[in-house]
Image (tube, coloured by chain):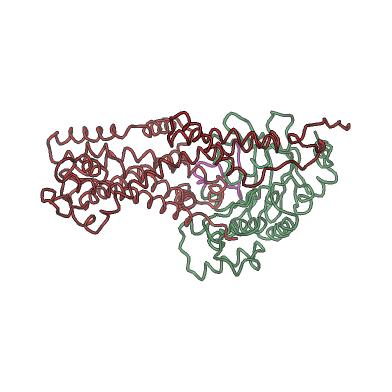
Amino acid sequence: MTNTESTPRHAAGGSKRPADSITGGQLPKHSWLLILALGWGIAAGILSVTDVFSIGGTAVLGMVLFFVLHYVASFAVEGRRRAADRLSRSVVTTFFLVALLPLGSLVWEVVSRGVARLDVAFFTETEAKTHIAGAQLGAAHALMGTLQSTAIAFLISVPIGLFTAIYLVEYGARTKLAAGIRFLVDVMTGIPSIVAGLFAYSLFSMIFGPGSAYTRTAFAGAIALTVLMIPTVVRSTEEMLKLVPNELREASYALGVPKWRTIVKVVLPTSLAGIVTGVILGIARIIGETAPLLVTAGYFQLTNPNPFSGTTATLPVMVYQSLRTIGPTAEQLHALGWAGALTLIIIVMGLNLIGRLIAWKFAPKTGR
Amino acid sequence: MAKRIEIKDLDIYYGKFHAVRGVNLTIEPRAVTAFIGSSGCGKSTVLRSINRMHEVIEGAYVDGQVLLDGVDLYGKDVDPVRVRRQVGMVFQRPNPFPTMSIRENVLAGVRLNNARMPRSEQDELVEKSLRGANLWNEVKDRLDRPGSGLSGGQQQRLCIARAIAISPDVILMDEPCSALDPISTLAIEDLIKELKDQYTVVIVTHNMQQAARVSDTTAFFNLKKQGEPGELIEVGPTEKIFHNPDQQATEDYITGRFG
């Protein structure tokens, strides 16, 4: 080993410290706030003087000026590396906030417009009295329809998806059949939802004839939703099963446990949290689908308790139908539509929360 | 109920890859046999072929015979699941079932096979197995806590308890101490010496001192050269292998003059 001469390097800009010093210049802690205000102020000034002032323009120009000024100030005091760090930090944070904007404004819009009609009548009444001015309207019929079609889709997709995933991970592994299934599942993931709806509609038309009462039903809607839900369940379950360490399977085999019982009693319990979360997210994915239900389940102003006969309302379709209404009852129906949209957001949020709760509850514990 | 294992002309393959060639070996009951040799020479592969865990890996198969008290494990009517109930195994990395408590882990072999057992018998079995694995005193107050909350050494002893709970005839150990600290290693080694009173014990180890300390018989595996299948070079009483081996390769390996 030889001693390498340390090459002299310039320390933080402008300072007279020796090259190997570990201290350097520092911008005051909250100086960025000042620079931000300065940037926006200059931007507003420039735009006012040139007579094109607007809030949006000030925001964009102000942020750009802020990036530049902040970088320059930091470069002068702290040196190049810290300046680059500050620049990328402020750019990333800004874009993160920009990304949050539409989400925040969407939630605000739906809550402010929908919360008024989220009353008892919303859950008990239907649209039966639409023709009576000032009558209480509700979404009970749509909630019922959504419950029916989602529950049926759930009951069909979960077993199919679960067993497919078990086949892919535990039995198929690297066979050609498994590769084919995997490819088809990937293709299914990308199917536009309207295509799933048309598929279910034409299937039922073929069986019962286009005009039959059995063609456009909650069940037909559920079949369309199943097409959308199966790939989600297969994919998430497959990933979860793959995460189970092989050592656990081997430990089970070494105890003389047959393969199927190893899957049922070791592999599935170990990955249960992830599987349940995946299924719940799958439900959240289909519960807001509009297009396929519009084609298959159609619409009906009253509660239709029979999922196998007659059209039925569902929440997303109700939102669509209400908000496009014009005429004397429009205001009432619009309020109902916004409340329906808010309900959908609440349901999806609730499902996500439940998914997280289950993931946390069932996750294998370390017990330390 | 310890049983004698005779391996006759055993060749092991992973798909097209010929991993082990022509092993002939007799493993005595109520004794500890150690497999030593450099990495990749097929010791673990041979070990796994003794309870048909080998074929769990896709494309793996064997040619030859492994006799357990005269019965060929690879015979036509043999069910690998039944073989594994008689030949238990402990793995390199401790692998207790993370969803199960300590108690459930010990009972896993019984429960996963859906055998019915009254509560009192279960308690008895748990205590007996944990005592057998020298773990009882450390965990008797927290049997319902998750097994994965134990230390590495405790987890490994829990895995041994789990293996002896199904009362096998043979216990195979694949580098059981390689992930453990010296104190846990000592605990396991003491345990191995006790286990040989009742079981046929086969242990794969990279630790030569460990082989010398715990085993009665030592088998040395080696590759003739890189890319060739692994072979059994020499087997004999541990004392002899370590002090006066017949083969030059064995002596080179034992004394560290290898490669």
Q: Position of residue B62 (x, y in %)?
A: 58, 36
Q: Is residue A145 magenta?
A: no
In this view of the protein, which residue sits in the foreground, A49 or B158? A49
Report the magenta residues as a range: B63-80
Q: Residue furthest left?
A: A132
Residue B196 higher or lower than B40, as above or below: below
Residues A218 and B149: in front is A218
Q: Quadrant of residue A321?
A: top left
Residue A59 vs residue A68: left or right?
Answer: left
Count of numbered circles in the view: 0
As displayed, is residue A289 above or below residue B15? below
Residue nearer the viewer, A337 or A9 = A9
Write down the colour of chain A: red
Residue farthest toward the right in the current orientation of the protein: A2
Residue A220 location (% of width, % of height): 22, 40
Quarter of the figure with the C terminus of chain A: bottom right
Left or right of B153? Residue A241 is left
Q: Is residue B229 left or right of residue A231?
A: right
* Chain B colour in the picture: green
x, y percent for residue B33: 71, 49
Residue visible at 59% across and 43% down in the picture: A34
- The residue nearer to you, when weighing A99 against B75, is A99
Q: Residue A262, image x and y in percent?
A: 48, 50
Q: Quadrant of residue B190?
A: bottom right
Task: Specify whether residue B73 is painted magenta.
Answer: yes
Q: Is residue A44 left or right of residue A68?
A: left
Assign the N terminus of chain A to one quadrant of the image. Answer: top right
Q: Residue at x 43, y 48 (%)?
A: A275
